[in-house]
């Protein structure tokens, strides 16, 4: 009944009932960013959460996939809710889950943080808004967890804050929190005192809270609680009276910062990892310690020494079913790879997951594949030796399954289901297990009328072409050239399989690439020079001219694949677009002034100032009609039918408009999509009647801040629209945009007006991001990077082994003679070194 009513209303084009679009991720499937924390519930089988620094919180499913949980709360004004600085799962009521949310403690994030709580496994949330900020994408975000639920009384929750705000406690299941005045340490370490931005010079604060479930109770509350702080002198504190009083633990390690602390109740032992920085990118030394709670003694159980200790330790996993079995990970070993160690004797001896054979060969005690996200393996840089990853702060063994383990990296989640084989055949199976986690920072999108449905330019993991399916993980990212970050993408209106992209990786190689098959295969643009990078790009309708509004070198032009040279008549940083039908026309916008070029980009002429507009944000050209151009500004959307000679404002109901896109509508007209401030606030709106009326098609779906959302729309499928996010990948939305009324005066958007066989994409767009929300993680590092100068690479492959290099061990076939002054010294059964 309902649907036939809607259909009939739609048929006469005057409907008022409007549906919100249905939203889901375009499937990239491999994580795409840093996963600083994973927690398993210790009492309920299969309950686990993964937190990300810019892409929200996820829940583990039985089939290894993940479900996003925090989309609804990351609306435009609350975009900082996708920064998750800590997560805790309730060991008494496993449906309860808590998270500390907020992105930055400095001016980049205007909002305070919050402790959010859910009693239905993260499906819905309530929040306690803090009176200060939380730094989910700040230094030290992999330390933790900073949030913990009392295992004896789940009304009690502790939170360890940054910025000097200390320790906080809830006694009402997270409805309210108040400061623990008896705990005075604040963790005064700062990552970089010389940084003036507030980002790296903020006080790091508290690192973790760990309850001792063995310790008994005081009035129902767990009596012994450990708290770690970011402090190189005194970092680990304990309360023996359920948090009433606190003292530093005597004889504790100094010189480094604790990252993780895990209790093994069966041993009455606390294990801790340390690094000399808070991470996540650095760490030049560190340690692993065991604190015996019964005897109150500390033991240094660091797996490596001397020159081999060129990294700090992050990830720490304890097998709760096998007392004495634990694993630790290097926080960052940039060359040749991360290192993971496992001990079955409480840290007395360790075995590594790889070791040097005859350099540069490694003996690998794992097999590796990425079937759930083939692009991870297929798009690896040829000269990158790293397979296991980097930035490993999250390392977990399933408390109910000793074979199941997971670890988070700067790129994805890895893990496997045969971990105990480490102790028998010393060979485990590792695969990417981040299916469902979409953490990409999307820079630009294009949807073109060909088999290529979508081109997505993304930060850190390059970019992806989706042909035919949006739910099949791409086999490859954009290769040849592999640019770690692509910032702009566009294609030719009259020749839609001609595509161009630009990047800002600036690794001493050209940052523009072209494709003539819709983005399947690419080659370097022959006219791109090193040092030109970033920004957006526009390809002329005939594919022979390229305008590139760079971040490095102003606005550039290339003709017929020639060298890019500066276009002085368009201001640096201008918004650009190509006309999609007239091959000699480009558009530009800067501040409130509109520009046109009619000579294929050689010169741009100011045509008109756009009324009271002070800021042109985006330009979308009609896919089928030359000279028909739509411009988004701070005061609204303006429309021209004469190449920008004159404009009319299409509707007063939208202001503060960011990206706009034209896509196939249900009837005779192009739909117009716009991120803007409108009747429902800062949302994605759509018009099916050429801009006369606008509908909120976003609904409860969160996309983060509207000024950070690239937008594109299908030219082939009515109502299909794509939204890029700064940390939650690409969303696709489907639905019908109903037409309320159509004014004949603006009927230029009729899809049938021109050659429907040469439908074209919307033009390029420049997104205005007012705050730098993505701290770029160099996900695909080239080899030989190290945060220390002491990379233990043996250069002697034929005879004498250098100091600190391997000279023996089970499975080792390399040279065994040590240089004069050193002897081959056994570390464990797997490893001997010259020392
Ligand atoms: C908490 O902050 C969020 C985001 O700013 C806001 O939407 C919400 O209304 C606030 N809640 C309360 C109880 O103040
Ligand atoms: C960490 O250790 C490395 C190696 O010793 C050293 O180069 C680096 O300066 C240290 N960093 C800090 C912040 O202590
Ligand atoms: C393209 O635009 C130019 C400049 O406005 C105009 O002179 C020319 O006739 C147009 N070409 C076509 C094919 O419309």
Image (cartoon, grey):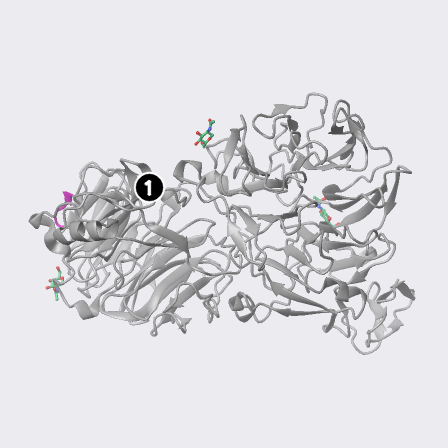
The residue that mark 1 highlights is 683
Does 205 sit above or below residue 324?
Answer: above
Residue in front for this viewpoint, 402 or 228: 402
In the rendered picture of this protein, how many numbered marks are placed on residues?
A: 1
Ligand 1 sits in quadrant: top left
* Residue 494 pos. (x, y %): 22, 69
| Residue 628, percent from left and from top | 16, 55
64 sits to left or right of 80 = right
Asked if residue 646 lies in the magenta stretch, the reply is yes
Q: Quadrant of residue 264?
A: top right
Judged from the image, the secondary structure of the residue bearing numbered disc 1 is strand
Q: In terms of depth relative to the viewer, which is nearer, 832 or 21?
A: 21
Percent x, y for residue 452?
34, 68
- Residue 122 visible at all: yes
The answer to whether residue 497 is magenta is no
Residue at image location 31% in from the left, 46% down from the top: 20
Whether residue 595 is visible to the viewer of this picture, yes or no, is no
Residue ID at (34%, 45%): 698
Q: Callout 1 environment at 10 Å: few (<14), some (14 to 19), or many (20+)?
A: many
Give the magenta part as a residue range: 645-649
């Amino acid at each position: 009944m309902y649907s036939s009513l809607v259909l009939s209303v739609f048929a006469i084009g005057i409907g008022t009932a409007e549906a919100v679009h249905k939203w889901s991720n375009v499937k990239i499937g491999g994580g795409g960013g840093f996963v600083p924390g994973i927690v398993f519930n210790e009492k309920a089988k299969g309950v686990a959460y993964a937190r990300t620094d810019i892409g929200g919180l996820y829940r583990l499913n039985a089939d290894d996939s993940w479900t996003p949980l925090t989309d609804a709360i990351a609306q435009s004004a609350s975009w900082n809710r996708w920064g998750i600085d800590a997560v805790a799962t309730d060991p008494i009521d496993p449906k309860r889950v808590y998270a500390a949310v907020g992105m930055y403690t400095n001016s980049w994030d205007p909002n305070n943080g919050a402790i959010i709580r859910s009693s239905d496994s993260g499906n819905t949330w309530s929040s306690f808004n803090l009176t200060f900020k939380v730094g989910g994408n700040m230094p030290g975000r992999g330390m933790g967890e900073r949030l913990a639920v009392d295992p004896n009384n789940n009304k009690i929750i502790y939170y360890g804050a940054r910025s000097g705000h200390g320790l906080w406690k809830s006694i009402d299941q997270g409805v309210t929190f108040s400061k623990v005045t008896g705990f005075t340490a604040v963790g005064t370490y700062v990552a970089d005192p010389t940084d003036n931005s507030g980002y790296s010079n903020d006080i790091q604060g508290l690192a973790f809270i760990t309850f001792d479930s063995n310790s008994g109770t005081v009035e129902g509350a767990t009596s012994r609680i450990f708290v770690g702080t970011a402090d190189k002198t005194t970092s680990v504190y304990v309360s023996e009276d359920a948090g009433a009083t606190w003292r530093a633990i005597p004889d504790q390690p100094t010189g480094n910062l604790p990252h993780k602390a895990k209790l093994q109740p069966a041993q009455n032992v606390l294990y801790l990892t340390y690094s000399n920085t808070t991470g996540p990118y650095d760490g030049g030394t560190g340690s692993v310690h065991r604190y015996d709670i019964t005897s109150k003694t500390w033991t240094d159980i660091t797996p490596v020494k001397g020159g081999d200790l060129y990294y700090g330790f992050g990830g720490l996993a304890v097998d709760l079913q096998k007392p004495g079995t634990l694993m630790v990970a290097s926080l960052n070993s940039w060359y040749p790879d991360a290192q993971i160690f496992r001990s079955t004797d409480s840290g007395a001896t360790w075995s590594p997951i790889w070791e040097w054979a005859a350099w540069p060969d490694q003996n690998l005690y794992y097999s590796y594949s990425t079937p759930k996200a083939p692009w991870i393996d297929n798009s690896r840089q040829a000269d990158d030796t790293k397979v296991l990853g980097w930035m490993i702060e999250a390392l977990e063994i399933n408390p109910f399954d000793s074979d199941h383990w997971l670890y988070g990296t700067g790129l994805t989640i890895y893990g496997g289901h045969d971990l105990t084989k480490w102790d028998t055949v010393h060979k485990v199976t590792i695969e990417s297990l981040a299916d469902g986690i979409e953490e990409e920072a999307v820079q630009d999108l294009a949807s073109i009328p060909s088999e290529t449905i979508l081109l997505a330019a993304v930060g850190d993991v390059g970019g992806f072409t989706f042909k035919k399916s949006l739910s099949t993980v791409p086999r490859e990212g954009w290769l040849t050239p592999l640019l770690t970050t692509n910032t702009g993408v566009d294609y030719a209106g009259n020749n839609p399989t001609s595509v161009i992209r630009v990047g800002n990786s600036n690794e001493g190689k050209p940052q523009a690439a072209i494709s003539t098959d819709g983005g399947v295969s690419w080659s370097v643009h022959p006219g791109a020079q090193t040092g030109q990078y970033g920004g957006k790009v526009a390809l002329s309708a005939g594919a022979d001219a390229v305008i590139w509004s760079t971040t490095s070198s102003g606005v550039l032009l290339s003709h017929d694949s020639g060298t890019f040279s500066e276009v002085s008549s368009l201001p640096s940083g201008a918004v650009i677009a190509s006309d999609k039908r007239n091959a000699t026309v480009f558009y530009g916008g800067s501040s409130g002034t509109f520009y046109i070029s009619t000579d294929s980009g050689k010169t741009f002429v100011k045509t008109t100032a756009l009324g009271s507009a002070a800021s042109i944000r985006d330009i979308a050209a009609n896919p089928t009609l030359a000279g028909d151009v739509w411009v988004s500004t701070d005061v609204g959307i303006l429309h021209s039918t004469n190449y920008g000679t004159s404009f009319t404002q299409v509707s007063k109901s939208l202001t503060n408009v960011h990206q706009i896109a034209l896509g196939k509508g249900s009837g005779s007209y192009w739909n117009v999509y716009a991120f803007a401030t409108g009747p429902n606030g800062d949302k994605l709106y759509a018009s099916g009647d050429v801009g006369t009326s606008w509908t909120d098609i976003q609904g409860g779906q969160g996309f983060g801040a509207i000024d950070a959302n690239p937008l594109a729309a299908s030219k082939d499928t009515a109502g299909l629209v794509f939204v890029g996010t700064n940390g939650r990948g690409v969303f696709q939305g489907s639905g019908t945009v109903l037409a309320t009324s159509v004014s004949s005066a603006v009927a230029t958007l009729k899809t049938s007006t021109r050659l429907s066989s040469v439908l074209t994409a919307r033009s390029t767009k420049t997104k205005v991001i007012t705050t730098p929300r993505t701290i770029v993680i160099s996900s695909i590092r080239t080899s030989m990077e190290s945060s220390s100068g002491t990379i233990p690479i043996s250069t002697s492959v034929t005879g004498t082994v250098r100091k600190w290099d391997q000279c023996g061990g089970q499975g080792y076939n390399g040279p065994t003679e040590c240089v004069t002054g050193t002897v081959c010294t056994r570390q464990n059964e797997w490893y001997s070194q010259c020392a």
